[in-house]
Image: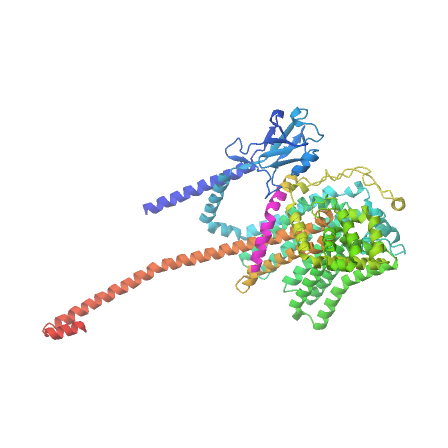
Amino acid sequence: MFKRNNVKKSSGLLYWIAWLVVVSAIGLELAAPDKLATIAPASIGNDQGFAYTLRLRSDSAMPLFVLAPGDDLEAPHRSLLELFEDGRPLREAHARHEEIRAIGRGRYSHWHNILLFSSSDGTAPPAGTRIYSYRVPQSIAPWLQGLAILCTVFILFRSRRRVFAALVSPELNRLLVLLSIATALTVTALTTHSMWGAWQLIDLQPDSSVYLAPAATALFSGEWSHRARPFVYPAIAFVAIWSGGTLDHLIALHIGAYLLGAPLIYAIVLMPGQLVARPLDHSRPAFHRSISHLIAATAVVVYFSLSALYLASVFYVAPEIFSSIAALTALWLSLKLMLDRELKPGNLVACALGTGLCAAAIVGMKPALLALAGLSLLLAGWGLWQQRTRLQPVMLIVTCGAMIALPAAVAVGDRYLAHQYHDVSARLFGPTTVFCNNADIISQALETPSSRARQLLGDTAARDVAQFLKDVQEDESWPILGFNGDRCMYTFAVRRIALERRYFGPTSDDVVRTYRQLLIASIADAPGLYARRVVRQFKRFLLDRSAGDCYRHDQHAWLPGTFAPDLPLVQRLVEERGSAIRGHTLPHPFPLDTLCNDLAKRMTTAHTTLVALALIGAMLCFFRRRTMPRLLMTLARAALISVAFWLSTAPIVALVHTFDIERYITVTFPLYVVMLASTLCFSLTLFVYGLTRAVDWGARSTAGMAAIPQATVGATADIVIGAQTSVTVCGARRGMMGRISNTRESMQIRY
């Protein structure tokens, strides 16, 4: 008893010591000071060209802290070092070393423990004409982090019953739900406040003269000239400008669509957990419901705090913002049809037709997202088929037909208008873009003997076109393609048109047909090259999401006159509609710079691993469908569908453009946030489920081990009692048979 009390007291002492270690580690991490240092000119060394070097200390002056590490090959954007020139921060961090040496202009790189940097004006830093300083964040030492984690595990293990009771308590669940909703509303309100009225500060964009002004002045009036844009978005532009009277109303509509993304993301992330917890009434579903709200609120915060490129596109008069909203709505409707088994027949039809409308909007505003529109229709049809018992066969067929007819009508109508108004540029723009942005694939196919692409054009035409495409690729300014496709589209337009007329056909339809056949033949000749293109672009798209993309408003300053319109048609529109054109700097959004940078770096290092683990877990769930609980299966479906929506943009976008273009990042960013939130929710639930199963298995094993000694004691007692009885009976028999002869006694004993 005395020993048990001592063990209990020691355990309680360790418990409070562990709490002290955890609280101290958290306090030190939050209060970790940044290291500020001024660079002595004598410590700066020469490198090459405009580059200079400085060797930094890898350890901190304080023993409990370590400096943030520099970049390396595995994490090229990991460094948090900020370099200042005369007190002003230099913006070009994580620059390539070749660019620092050849170009300079304030580029720098913190590589391992070496700082390679350049001055903003080409002066030599060792001369001391400018003062250079840097700031590096610090964090607690790794040994202290590990100790805090071990102490946290010990605390949770010792107080596991109280922790579980607190987690599933109704009070905490209600608090989490209210906190999540309040957070999402607050962030949305701050964003709205920072952007309200900002559209009056933005000049017209160059694209306005291409498709916006003609759409507003001559839509459906015999002067169709929508160029690269299908008629859906010019129709929206026409209605917004005609009803409001100024171009500002269209930009206000963009901002409204951008803000609409927040409740859509919240609803999409929240839906799976709510569908699972809805028919149940005990404590654990309430816990899952509150966690779903918490993750949904986190997704909204990420959506607004990391959408610098997205925010800039709000002020860019283009259809990307509407395409992303249509994609989010299509994802929500698809999840509804796939997961909700309690929809009424009318709601099923409404969700299916809504998906068709979203697909039509995507096709009508962003043809490059054709794969995403097709996936929406496929999932909606699959959801209807799974719930076909709720609909009559005629209603099911009519609904599916109408759902498919909506995007088809948009495509047919757009094609008809283009032919009706002889809009050759609209028919040629897409195929020409695909041809130019795949110059490397097509030129390699044309130079390969007996290839299908070479047979299509002939030897002479193949040689001339291949030489033209090789000249296009001489400019290596684009990091993903390796060349600038706009050189083919615009710079060498006269030479390209001459090749079209000479080898591709006399009419625009012949040119379009030749472009398409040439691309299909080139990909068929070398499918691996196209697959590597997709993987390379998507890898770049994943790894380039760093803190440098947060709040790039200083780089995208909307200065007076920068985007001033100069075409007479736009000027006439401004005069007629009275649009107030003023140029000012873009207002800075709500102050979440620290959160933005921190979240961006966390996501850069975690999203690939998170998505991979979620996909592996989802596939394992489907292989063991009968043994998995309903919650896991529903979340697995939601994670797979959200990942598929995000990935579906890759194959076609890889043909028509690159992922380093802000427009496509703009469209896919909301889907990217939803995908991360869905995979995070599923991964956490899968981890908790596995942990619960492990604890249950450990409890059963412990109970089994405890039962073994009891069974052994019982069996031993039975053996002892049986042995005593046998001895007593044997002694009595020997006494009774004492007078028997030795022969019979020996026989009895043997018997």
Indicate left or right for 97 with 255 as reference: left
Per the picture, the main secondary structure of the magenta-coloured stretch is: helix
Q: Is residue 575 visible?
A: yes
Colouring style? rainbow
Q: Measuring 61% from the left and 24% from the top, which residue is drawn there?
A: 42
Number of numbered markers = 0
Of the pair 36 and 713, the residue shown nearer to us = 36
Q: Is residue 366 above or below residue 62?
A: below
Q: Is residue 290 visible?
A: no
Q: Tell me residue 66's x, y (percent).
A: 54, 35
Of the pair 346 and 377, the residue shown nearer to us = 377
The reply to whether the magenta stretch includes residue 600 is yes
Of the pair 210 and 335, the residue shown nearer to us = 210
The reply to whether the magenta stretch includes residue 646 is no
What residue range appears in magenta?
598-619
Q: Quadrant of residue 55?
A: top right
Q: Tell me residue 208's x, y (percent).
A: 83, 47
Indicate left or right for 618 with 483 as reference: left
Q: Tell me residue 420's x, y (percent).
A: 87, 59
Q: Is residue 582 above or below residue 526?
A: above
Q: Measuring 54% from the left and 59% from the top, which residue is drawn there?
A: 282
Q: Quadrant of the C terminus?
A: bottom left
Q: Is residue 69 above or below residue 420?
A: above
